[in-house]
Amino acid sequence: MSRSFWAWARLLGGAAIIALVLWRLGTGAFLDGLRVLDGGTLALAFGIGVVTTVLSAWRWCLVARGLGMRLSLKDATADYYQALFLNAALPGGVLGDVGRAVSHGREEGDVGRGVRAVVLERTAGQIVLVVVGGAVLISVPSPVLTLISENGRAIAMVAAVAAMAALLVLGIARRVRQSGSKLAGAARTGAAEIRSGLLARRNWPGVLFASAMVLIGHLATFIVAARVAGNGASFLTLAPMLLLALLAMGIPLNVGGWGPREGVMAWAFGAAGLSAEQGVTIAVAYGICAFVAAAPGAIVVAVRAAKKMRRPVLTPVAVQAEQPDFRVRVTAPVSPAVVVNSAAPIPVPIRRTAVRRPAYSSSGATA
């Protein structure tokens, strides 16, 4: 199917989730998420955002340099802020990342490698989130753990099928890599870039540290939103639901990041007996805090747009074709057998020959 179909499907899916939450809970929970915020809360969220954005940009630098690309921390931070702002302001939630990937790839002369660097960088963060979130959800009491215990047999069967499918995919991928097709070449290139960009000894400690700290920053922002919303539950109680919300934000069915987060928070808080309305209020407050943290990206967008407008536009200069220039050469053939008498001038025949002068282009080279 076309890309436009999936883009519309993501938007409509996110809008449907928001509409469902509004239908079940009303607009009060959404409005409360705006009312509970104040200047101090937004300033704290902004400060947390600075730390997480710089760490994310550093992670991107590590991955890009591992793939043999140049990327300074200053440029990466500016690009990351712009991407975060566009992700939050535009539908889909990924257009900013697509933009920074393509822009960096063009600067380095390899758009494909630039896109793969961003994909690997974001994948590293998602892997840390999935591992930490999975460990917490299956070990800390939460609605998810209750759901797992009540449907343990069905979940075990689904997990077994998923494991078998994963092994099958790995086996097929190994055979494909050993063949000589273009797909095999792409698979080998991808494996090599994963090793050099993520798993290299000089890279993985920094990538892991940055991903862990970014995750802690997101959780800290969620805790700030929960506290201003009036929730006094302990971090251990809130952690499973907040991690579940962060996992839901990775679902590609959202409108600028809105949709799955609010739906999951409403279900999780309602199932935990904490109030579904409060869960939505916390989710909305977190969304506003995240948008404020990404606000410097708007400045980056405006400054870069202004630079493009001030950049002089080179107009092509029309070069008029010059008229052909001719020179006249006079030749006087003389026969050695003829005796020249100075007293009687001998009529000399004149022959005119046209010699074309080479034309020159505007650059100075002969045409």
Image (cartoon, rainbow, N blue to C red):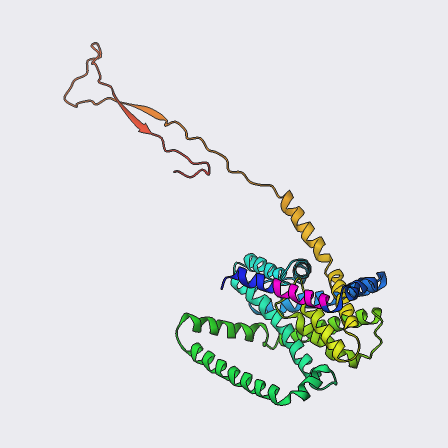
Residue 98 visible in the current orientation: yes
Instruction: Using the rendered view, name the quadrant where residue 311 is placed.
Output: top right
Q: Quarter-wise, where is residue 95 in the image?
A: bottom right
Estimate the x, y position of residue 256 in percent, counting from the top left: 67, 62
Q: Residue furthest top?
A: 343
> Considering the image in quadrants, where does the C terminus appear?
top left
Q: Nearer the viewer, residue 221 or 82?
A: 221
In the image, residue 270 sits, relative to residue 2, either above or below, namely: below
Give the overall secondary structure of the magenta segment. helix
310 or 91, nearer to the observer: 91
Q: Is 147 situated above or below 111?
A: below
Q: Residue visible at 39% across and 74% down?
A: 180
- Residue lying furthest front: 23
Residue 289 within the magenta-colored segment of the rendering? no
Above or below, 255 relative to 197: above
Q: Residue furthest left?
A: 337
Query: Residue visible at 58% across and 59% down?
Result: 104
Residue 249 percent location from the top left of the image:
67, 70
User: Looking at the image, how many numbered discs can be counted on the residues?
Assistant: 0
Magenta extent: 12-23
- 344 left or right, relative to 26: left
Q: Nearer the viewer, residue 264 or 174?
A: 264
Indicate left or right for 217 with 347 as reference.
Answer: right
**Residue 20 among those drawn in magenta:** yes
Q: Position of residue 3 (x, y in %)?
A: 52, 61
Q: Is residue 50 visible?
A: no
In the figure, residue 135 lies in which quadrant? bottom right
Q: As displayed, is residue 180 above or below residue 91?
A: below
Give residue 344's position: percent from left, percent from top.
20, 10
Q: As rendered, which of 363 and 203 lies closer to the eye?
A: 203
Q: Is 172 placed left or right of 107 in the picture? A: left
